[in-house]
Image (cartoon, rainbow, N blue to C red):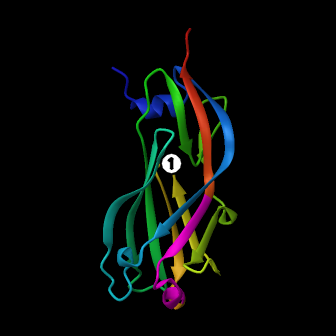
Amino acid sequence: MNPFTFEEQVFSQNGYSIELMEKAVPLEFFIKPDWITFDTYERKKHQLKLYDENKTQIYLNEIWLEEFGDELQVGFHISRILDHEEGNFLSNTIFYPDGKNSVNFEREQFAIFDSNHQEIEVKQIGASESSFSLGIDKKQLPRIKNGFYVKYTGMNLYQYEKDLS
């Protein structure tokens, strides 16, 4: 019995090959005002699907105000439903020929804009194979009262296929 999940087998290139098709795929999401926590420290858990292409789904996972910090945190979850033979997927991971990989995240990949498309500073970022997150300074809450846009270019488009050998 194989101890790896199917996705882990593909990502570690265990019986599969992965090829980069497109770097820095631009994604943009609008976060509606009623999804945002403005005046309570309670986490709003959502699971709202914002993206569904290339066998990849991105969900708004949760939004919360830090009780002892100075940021509004916004968390996203990435999931995939891969075919067993071949296909495409998006990932914020860099895959190396030896089967190793690393999560790709840099501040320049994240941008936030208010509903008038005026940029807002991103305070904090984070990423893993299955998620990414960002922080917005609480002082900016009045600017996002009508919602805000998140632009993210940390995802790459990959093609994979089962090894024939």
Residue at 67% over, 36% down? 21
Which image quarter: residue 159?
top right
Coordinates of residue 104 in the picture (x, y in percent): 63, 52
Asked if one can make out residue 123 in the rendered structure from this viewpoint, the answer is: no
* Relative height, residue 93 to residue 99 (above, below): below
Which image quarter: residue 45?
bottom left
Quadrant placement of the C terminus: top right
Task: Determine the secondary structure under disc 1.
Answer: loop
Does the magenta run of residues contain 136?
Answer: no
Judged left or right of residue 38, residue 30 is: right
Residue at 57% over, 73% down? 124
Judged left or right of residue 37, residue 71 is: right
Coordinates of residue 5 in the picture (x, y in percent): 39, 32
Q: Nearer the viewer, residue 36 or 126?
A: 36
Coordinates of residue 121 in the picture (x, y in percent): 63, 79
Asked if one can make out residue 61 in the rendered structure from this viewpoint, the answer is: yes
Q: Which residues are magenta?
A: 140-152
- Kindly identify which residue carries mark 1: 129
Does the magenta run of residues contain 148?
Answer: yes
Q: Amino acid at mark 1?
A: Glu
Q: Kindly give the residue lying farthest to the front in the view shown.
A: 116
* Relative height, residue 106 to residue 85 (above, below): below
Judged left or right of residue 52, residue 106 is: right
Q: Nearer the viewer, residue 34 or 128?
A: 34
* Relative height, residue 83 to residue 129 (above, below): above
Quadrant placement of the N terminus: top left
Coordinates of residue 15 in the picture (x, y in percent): 52, 19
Residue at 37% over, 28% down? 3
Which image quarter: residue 94?
top right
How packed is label 1: few (under 14 Cα within 10 Å), some, or many (20 or more)?
some
Residue at 49% over, 43% down? 53
* Relative height, residue 10 to residue 127 (above, below): above
